[in-house]
Amino acid sequence: MPATLTVLVQEDHSFYYRNETDDWVGFNHELIDTMQRHLAVPVEIKRFTSQEALIQAFAAGQGDIMCPAIALNRASPDPALLAASEHQRFPTLRMKVSDEEDFVWVLRRELSDAAALLKDWLHTTRSQLVVANLYSKYFAHLGLLNKFDLVMLKSRYRRDFPRYRALFEEAGRRYDVDPLFLAAMSYQESHWDPTATSYTGVRGLMMLTQDTAAAVGVTDRADPRQSVLGGTKYLTQIMKQIDDEVGRPDDNYYALAAYNVGLGHVQDAQEIVKRGGEDHTLWSNLRDALPLLSKPAYYTTLKYGKARGQEPVRYVDSIRNYYSLLSQLETKDDR
């Protein structure tokens, strides 16, 4: 294996992209980071704006691993990219992300040993959870979570949820919030991992920033009870600031979006809806407006400026889906 792996990636607004805070994010970005830690080998990234440029660079020997921004449907013939790769006998890594789709990486022939190591790793339960979590994070907004996501949620529902159920119930009683709603929110934030830490520095079951933690009296963000109570307190503070004319359940979705991106940006998105002559109290309209916060034509005219508007949409969609799935699991357990 070379001293440094050169990874070629295709830029795409789900697989690999720069967000509005100029950080690189995306499914492939996070999975490459995980792979780098697993192999303990430094990684050099080369980015391409098109699949054609990516393929040409890989064919010219400019990289060790190629990460295209494609999903392979098992019911359809392989796309030309994969067919050409397999014809030249390049090792490929397939990652199951749903019942119908795989994502794929292509490796140069000299990395057959690395391919074997990565294939073994991708078949472990831990790596499958990583892939499932990343898939739900970056693609859940495309529709209801699939059966693979449900399998992963079921696993953690049995393994992890019992140890935190009482905390969600306590926070729910104290702040008059549905405990299962809080559980779904926490699953989206940390997948019920109290040690979770993001690249932006948020931590804990409810992924609080240092400033938010201090504002709600949390002294240890990794403490499960403090995190759940503090995160719920912060959420209810936001709920009280949502326009009174926003009805239920839309006000819950507004509050979730504000928890993720900030209340000011939610208010800016409402202003976009108003300017378009639509009802600013409906989540369906706000959901369409939030992604516009990343476009100069809009954010330069608004009070709070530029924001990663697509992320709160994904965030709310995911929590709604997790809440639905958790409700189904709770109903089955009550039978």
Image (cartoon, rainbow, N blue to C red):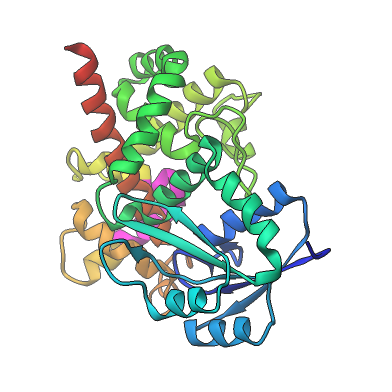
Which residue does the image show at 65% across and 24% down from the upper left? Answer: 220
- Is residue 182 in view from this perspective? yes
Q: Which residues are magenta?
A: 257-270
The overriding secondary structure of the stretch rendered in magenta is helix
Asked whether residue 26 appears in the rendered view, the answer is: no
Numbered-mark total: 0
Residue at the spot x=42%, y=39% of the render? 188
Q: Position of residue 179 (x, y in %)?
A: 33, 21
Find residue 100 and report its image quarter: bottom left
Does 254 appear above or below 296?
above
Question: Dividing the image into 4 quarters, which one contains the C terminus?
Answer: top left
Q: Position of residue 276 (x, y in %)?
A: 20, 72
In the foreground, 293 or 128: 128
Q: Quadrant of the N terminus?
A: bottom right
Q: Nearer the viewer, residue 207 or 306?
A: 207
Q: Position of residue 162 (x, y in %)?
A: 42, 14
Determine whether, in the image, residue 278 is placed left or right of residue 173.
left
Give whichever of 335, 58 is nearer the camera: 58
Q: Is residue 268 on the magenta stretch?
A: yes
Q: Is residue 126 above or below residue 140?
A: above
Residue drawn where x is 80% and y is 65% of the image: 2
Q: Position of 46 compared to 145: left or right? A: right
* Residue reaching furthest to the right: 3
Query: In the image, is residue 209 above or below residue 47?
Result: above
Residue 50, magenta (yes or no): no
> At 54% from the left edge and 87% from the top edge, which residue is drawn?
53
